[in-house]
Image (tube, rainbow, N blue to C red):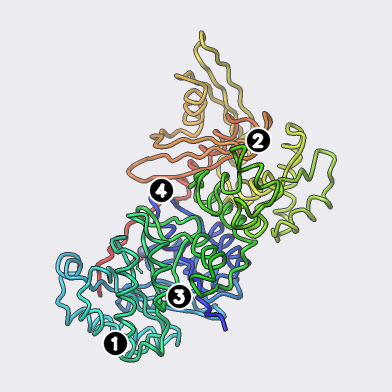
Amino acid sequence: MERRVLIFDTTLRDGEQSPGVSLTPAEKLEIARQLARLRADVIEAGFPVASPGDFEAVKAIAREVRGPVICALARANPVDIDRAAEALAGAERKRIHTFIASSDVHMKYKLRKEPREVMEAAVAAVKRARQYTEDVEFSAEDATRSRPDFLCSLFRAAIEAGASTINVPDTVGYTTPREFAELIRFLRENVPGIDRVVISVHCHDDLGLAVANSLAAVEAGAGQVECAVNGIGERAGNASLEEVVMALKVRQDALGALTGIATEQIYRTSRLVATLTGMPVPPNKAVVGANAFAHESGIHQDGVLKERTTYEIMRPEDVGVPAGRLVLGKHSGRHAFRERLLALGYQLREEDVEKAFARFKEMADRKKDISDRDLEALVENEVLKEPEVWSLDCFQVSTGNRSLPTATVSLVKNGQVVQEAACGDGPVDALLRAVERAVGADFHLLEFSLKAVTGGKDALGEAAVRVERDGAVYSGRGLSTDVLEATVRAYLQAVNRWLSGMPVRRQVAAAGVD
Ligand code: KIV
Ligand code: ZN
């Protein structure tokens, strides 16, 4: 019988620790629903003690998402563990994941603790977590730079205290495949009781080795891989879920293990995460990049036409890459629209279908054919947005290479229309200055990007901004066939997030025990 490896998805926790990424609770819930469709075994939904927003997101996911185990992260201290348990209370199946650092450098400088104290904190944390659930994961942070004998003692103590999964993180992405496989074998041979628990691995990509290290660990006997969609995560990111899963599927002959992932949901999950996090997928990214199945050279095209397997080791449909079908136009009705959304996997509330339909009609007036990809962008950008304080009524821009760009905007707040005008260095500058005048606040624009959702001159443009005010950073996204309109919509979302106090990220001390 094939060996089954568990996929522990940490997109919503470690993935959300990617620089510049901030997801609202509604966006996290949407991603968690999609991860359930993907059939991830475990969803690490967040770090509840980190912020009220994290707590609410974990709570909503625990209450609403069925299928996968829902997991919450906690440092090895009672406050974190109690908060994680509280957030997870509504889950059908829950896991508390507690961690403490085990390398000399972390214990000495970050924790300022003796190994004995770290051991005591770990045991107490696992025991406390066990009071809430039998499913407790213990991680020895920076395991790959820890002294192997100490790691063995720590894992032994955690297992005796009741941990059911022990996780071996390569926190700083330092190890290599052979070395990591040896560490897993060493632990299997030297930690009493390890055969009763699942050995998990959690690899970071600082040297570009996260996937290779994870696969080497699976070959050496690891039973769970922690990974994130599109490989997002702290610094260079985590092992990419889609790469780990497809490597295990395509090379089952060599790696000898399988996952339970519904691989045809991979592309859609990747798109959703890219859109909501604002972290685009590079075109050459393995499995989900735009070029992953594109054959450019004549020799390759000729080969694929004669026999697909000459240059393709997996089929686009295996990972759910859509055929790029044109589906709807301006004459399409509500019924066809709702059916298409359902076929794409969106189960929206009636009011959200109405909202999406209204925006679809606006877009269809300007864009002849609306593809599946356009619809996905529409739902992800427009429907999953939090309520707006300021919204766009209309705008006008006048620009040219020999004239001073000027813009006027008309915005609405509480039913009141506010109009302003401004000049700028270019049309975007003029427009954003006019918005700032209307809302009565200045922002520092840190990042601005524009990309086309699909091909063609009438393609939908997706704008993303990150702005700073009073030391806090706010992000926003907007969608329109008009790139300037997409830009204003993105800017307004950032402004609205500022008004509702939703900065991109907060810092949590990783060290604190008690
Ligand atoms: O990278 C790491 O060590 C972590 C732990 C919390 C598992 O993310
Ligand atoms: Zn990590």
The residue beneath circle 3 is 224
Dot 4 or dot 3, earlier in sequence? 4
Image point (85%, 40%), residue name:
331
Secondary structure at numbered mark 2: loop
Dot 1 or dot 4, earlier in sequence? 4
Q: Is mark 2 within 8 Å of ligand 2?
A: no
Is 488 left, or right, of 86 in this rendering? right
**Residue 355 at x, y percent in the picture:** 71, 48
For residue 20, which numbered disc appears in the image?
A: 4
Badge 2: residue crowd in 10 Å (few <14, some 14–19, many ≥20): few
For residue 14, which numbered disc appears in the image?
A: none
**Mark 2 belongs to which amino acid?**
Gly
The residue beneath circle 2 is 455
Secondary structure at numbered mark 3: strand
**Which one is in front, 145 or 280?**
145
The residue beneath circle 1 is 156
Dot 2 or dot 4, earlier in sequence? 4
Secondary structure at numbered mark 4: loop
Instruction: Work out how far the residue at label 4 is from the one at label 3, CA to CA, in angstroms.
Output: 28 Å
Quarter of the figure that contains the C terminus = bottom left
Secondary structure at numbered mark 1: helix
**Mark 1 belongs to which amino acid?**
Arg
Verify CB contact (< 8 Å) between mark 1 and mark 2: no
Q: Is residue 199 above or below residue 269?
A: below
Dot 1 or dot 2, earlier in sequence? 1
Q: Nearer the viewer, mark 2 or mark 4?
A: 2
**Mark 3 belongs to which amino acid?**
Gln
Residue furthest out toward the top: 402
Badge 1: residue crowd in 10 Å (few <14, some 14–19, many ≥20): many
**Which one is in front, 176 or 374?**
176
Instruction: Work out how far the residue at label 3 is from the one at label 1, CA to CA, in angstroms.
Output: 18 Å
